[in-house]
Amino acid sequence: VCLFFYRFPSTTHFVFFFFFNDTATTEIYTRSLVGSVRCGIRDSFSLIEAALELQFQARSFEHEAAFIYNEIAINFRILGKKVEAQKNFEFAIENAPNWSIPFSNYAQLYIEDDLSKALRIAKHAIRLSPRNSYAYNVEALVYLKSKDFIRAEASFLQAIKLDPCYIDAFYNVACIKSLKQDYKAAKIYLESAINCGFSDIDFAREDPDLELFRNQVEWNELLGSVLLKDKK
């Protein structure tokens, strides 16, 4: 299963933000985002910590900027600091109670230890913004964790309906199809994820939810087509 925290608004969400009224704050915050993205690429905690320092500086200029608190919370979660992440998601929600994204991220924070709370928060995020594809993806992850494959698939497909190239949702539906031993469908959805930009084949090779699929001819066919594309 592919799981991530939402950082940037896509055009499908129709979310409008009021950006900082201070040039220095904008510059500091932008550099912090670059650090966060680089960390995602390089998988380096040192870059996340550097990004956090810049975000703390930006927060000193804009004490009520929900967007900054949301980013800080995401980075604390990546570092495994759940209490700090929870506190900053709550600050983001307090300062922007009608903004769906912090609720979506907050819900994901509880997927491992409180599924009922995670589902409740995810559904609230959807109520706030019915076009928030990420909220549906989080709701689906909760259902998937609960082994409720029917509801999980329905929520992932709703996320795809709102965002037709939602890589994580396509990938996660492929996982469900694998678990349900529908290998032709697993191939179709994983291929869709790849066509939308998924490239971490090593991750797919190790994902336990795709284990049954990897033992099938459809996996070899998909892998062959990916390798063929790489050679072109």
Image (spheres, rainbow, N blue to C red):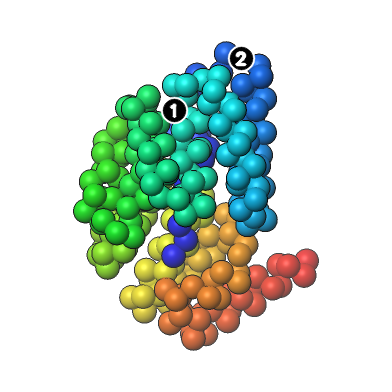
Residue sitting at the far right: 232
Q: Is residue 40 left or right of residue 123?
A: right
Q: Residue at x 50, y 81 (%)?
A: 214
Q: Position of residue 113 (x, y in %)?
A: 29, 59
Which circle marks residue 66 in the picture?
1
Quadrant of the rendered image containing residue 13: top left
Which circle marks residue 190 in the picture?
none
Image height of 21 relative to 182, above or below = above
Image quadrant holding the C terminus, namely bottom right
Residue matched to label 2: 22
Mark 2 or 1 closer to N-term? Answer: 2
Q: Amino acid at mark 1?
A: Ala
Count residues near mark 1 (Cα–Cα under 10 Å), then give few for <14, some for 14-19, many for 20+.
Answer: many
Q: Residue at x 51, y 66 (%)?
A: 190
Image height of 202 relative to 124, above or below = below
Q: Is residue 72 left or right of residue 230?
A: left
Q: Is residue 35 left or right of residue 163?
A: right
Count residues near mark 2 (Cα–Cα under 10 Å), then give few for <14, some for 14-19, many for 20+.
Answer: few
Q: Position of residue 195 (x, y in %)?
A: 59, 58
Distance from disc 2 to disc 1, alpha carbons, whole Å, reads 16 Å
Image quadrant holding the N terminus, namely bottom left
Answer yes or no: is residue 139 visible: no
Quadrant of the rendered image containing residue 176: bottom left
Give 147 or 133, whichever is nearer the viewer.
147
Q: Position of residue 154 (x, y in %)?
A: 30, 56
- Please give the count of numbered marks on the rendered protein: 2
Residue sitting at the far top: 21
Give 70 or 134, whichever is nearer the viewer.
70
Q: Is residue 188 left or right of residue 43?
A: left
